[in-house]
């Protein structure tokens, strides 16, 4: 059996490093063909020395020479810059891209891979949130399989396997309902933490799910499930519900996406119903979680509205993490952006890029950044 | 699209009548080709007049003339007796048998259908409990699909769809843990109720699951789940768990089995996670539910031991329902039968029949029936 050649875009991030753990544990099945990082040159070099990929790309061009020099004694080809990311995604030397770049920056390389008909293990929500119609259309045209890595979408994907033309009545996305709950004071706060706390991540997941599974907004429900054991569910047209469950552990959906359609034995900790005594569910409080209401509005409206939502959100979260605005101000800014930026019903890719820029500038101007 | 011609064995029982409801609601998809009943001639006649099947069989030969006469003005062919049940199962005029006869009596007609390579929607646990090796071997040889109707096994079947060669780590059968809980005083007590109360039904389901899904005893776990929402689960080799859920309603797995691989839209009440706030799980107490321990022992031992367990259980439940023995005596009698009847590791079908008779006689002798 030949190895599946994996291109990890965003190899130094949380998803990327875990994907490399999976590859290291199953070197008979996978090889790391391409590794890319935005700025963490030290880790990228370390990974390149361990996995001996064909190519590495460092996004930050100032770090090119450093990386090049460190890998001089190896056969690893080194490139740098945003443009190189996109070009490398267009090469034919890999079988599957793991799209692990966080945020809007992941869109262009992923589009490139899809255009090549490559399988994409998609960990980057924004790709579909911003330009889902264009990405999915391109995937259909080029027969590129998109396999979600997000635990929620992986759950839905797993529940749909083998169901053929059986129709979905609705999907039920589960939300933990608050990452600050029970955390220690020195808990690391990142964009993903903030998005989880505001339920914006769930809103983005709703939009992502719409495109991945070809759903109407009415077919997407969010339920708060504090234990994070049920990763999401599908209710079929006959009323039967299928759920995928497990301990919260990103390695499982990462491994699933890389190895699909095969499952691989592993030693990850396992859910045990002798110890897991209760699972609870409740409706999200839209009045508290106003971002979820905004995301639902963007989902319903369609066009470039999710792109506006996402761009404004990236700006306000960045500002919040730097203590430039308060927690509740974030929602205000997003809402204003959604009201002020010109709505386009069927944007071209260029119009998406323009919308993204406009929304960022507008949001930044409101918070004087 | 042509109708699927269904042969309902046990059409006047709980499963049979619900299957006819499904057929009546989807007469474009299904026709009732054969209906059989043991003794309820009045309902069988009524069903025949409504569904106009090709053939009806009444098990009790004394009722033949009554049924024959009532259907004289129709084109329905009428047969009677145990032998006729088996012969009719061997006809080629139907596409799928719904094996809805309760207890050991369902074995012979089901074997006949499997031998003809017919699809079997299996609602009769005992077929596999008693002679699972022979039935499954015959199904493989004749490429007969066996689709479970039991909600637990239907759940597992649904979770396995599309998983190809992915290995099962274990299945988790859920048990409500007591059908007497919260019931009204006039609640009808039947064999199925008693088997649920003693968890013998869960024990029989473990044995059934072993054969249906080709599992070792160690791969089968039972968990108490009082809400009966999660109908059962599968944990795969990668640790991922898939569950099938819904309101407790036998019509759904019946419809699923009849229409497989398609799902059909229906108006059955639906599970709503806005109303279902909690699901709980706990380990069964083997000391209280001694029948579950006995069934596990039979499962581990294999051979004709499950056949002995089932035969003795049918006798003691019959006796208990007629106030001939106490609730706790039932387990004693089954245990003694398992100790006293000769163990056979690889019984022939004839030896299964002999074991069944011996175990029944032995159990009956202990309770002076």
Image (tube, coloured by chain):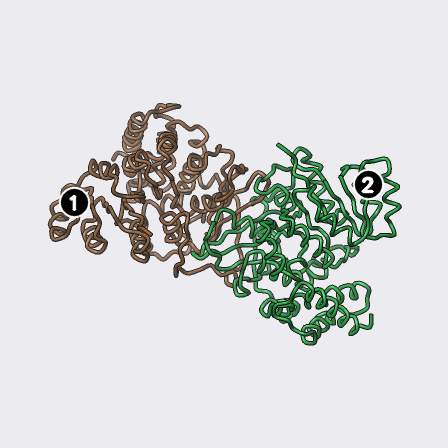
Chain colours: A brown, B green
Judged from the image, the secondary structure of the residue bearing numbered disc 2 is helix
Q: Could you say which disc has been placed on residue A78 in the image?
A: 1
Report x, y in % for residue A162: 50, 44
Q: In front: A338, or A217?
A: A217
Judged from the image, the secondary structure of the residue bearing numbered disc 1 is strand
Please tell me in which quadrant of the rendered image residue B297 appears.
Answer: bottom right
Q: Report whether mark 1 lies on the same chain as mark 2.
A: no
Q: In front: B297, or A221?
A: B297
According to the picture, the residue beneath numbered tag 2 turns out to be B46
Residue at the image point whose x is 84% and y is 45% from the top: B42
Report x, y in % for residue A114: 32, 36
Q: Does the residue at mark 1 contact the one at mark 2 (Cβ under 8 Å)? A: no
Q: In front: B128, or A286?
A: B128
Parent chain of label 1: A
Of the 4 image quadrants, the one containing the N terminus of chain B is top right
Q: In front: B333, or A307?
A: B333
């Amino acid at each position: 059996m030949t190895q599946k050649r994996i291109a990890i875009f965003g190899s130094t991030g949380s998803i990327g490093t875990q994907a490399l753990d999976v590859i290291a544990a199953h070197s008979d099945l996978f090889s790391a063909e391409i590794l890319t990082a935005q700025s963490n040159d030290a880790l990228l070099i370390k990974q390149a020395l361990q996995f001996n990929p064909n190519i590495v790309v460092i996004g930050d061009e100032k770090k090119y020479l450093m990386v090049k020099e460190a890998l001089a004694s190896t056969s690893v080809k080194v490139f740098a810059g945003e443009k190189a990311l996109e070009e490398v995604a267009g090469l034919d030397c890999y079988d599957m891209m793991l799209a692990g770049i966080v945020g809007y920056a992941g869109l262009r390389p992923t589009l490139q891979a899809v255009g090549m008909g490559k399988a994409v293990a998609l960990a980057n929500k924004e790709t579909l949130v911003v330009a889902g119609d264009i990405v999915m259309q391109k995937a259909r045209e080029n027969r590129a399989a998109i396999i979600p890595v997000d635990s929620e979408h992986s759950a839905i994907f797993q529940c749909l396997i083998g169901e053929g033309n059986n129709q979905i009545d609705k999907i039920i996305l589960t939300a933990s309902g608050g990452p600050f709950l029970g955390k220690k004071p020195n808990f690391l706060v990142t964009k993903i933490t903030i998005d989880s706390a505001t339920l914006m991540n769930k809103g983005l997941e709703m939009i992502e799910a719409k495109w991945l599974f070809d759903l109407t907004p009415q077919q997407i429900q969010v339920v708060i499930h504090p234990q994070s054991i049920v990763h999401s569910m599908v209710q079929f047209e006959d009323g039967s519900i299928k759920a995928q469950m497990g301990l919260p552990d990103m390695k499982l959906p990462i491994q699933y996406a890389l190895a699909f359609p095969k499952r691989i034995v592993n030693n990850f900790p396992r859910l045990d119903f002798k110890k897991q005594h209760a699972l609870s569910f409740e409706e999200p409080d839209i009045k508290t979680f106003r971002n979820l209401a905004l995301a639902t509005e963007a989902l319903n409206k369609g066009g470039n509205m999710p792109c506006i939502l996402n761009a404004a959100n990236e700006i306000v979260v960045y500002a919040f993490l730097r203590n430039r605005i308060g927690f509740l101000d974030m929602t205000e800014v997003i809402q204003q952006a959604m009201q002020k930026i010109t709505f386009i019903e069927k944007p071209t890719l260029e119009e998406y890029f323009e919308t993204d820029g406009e929304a960022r500038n507008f949001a930044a101007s409101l918070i004087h950044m």
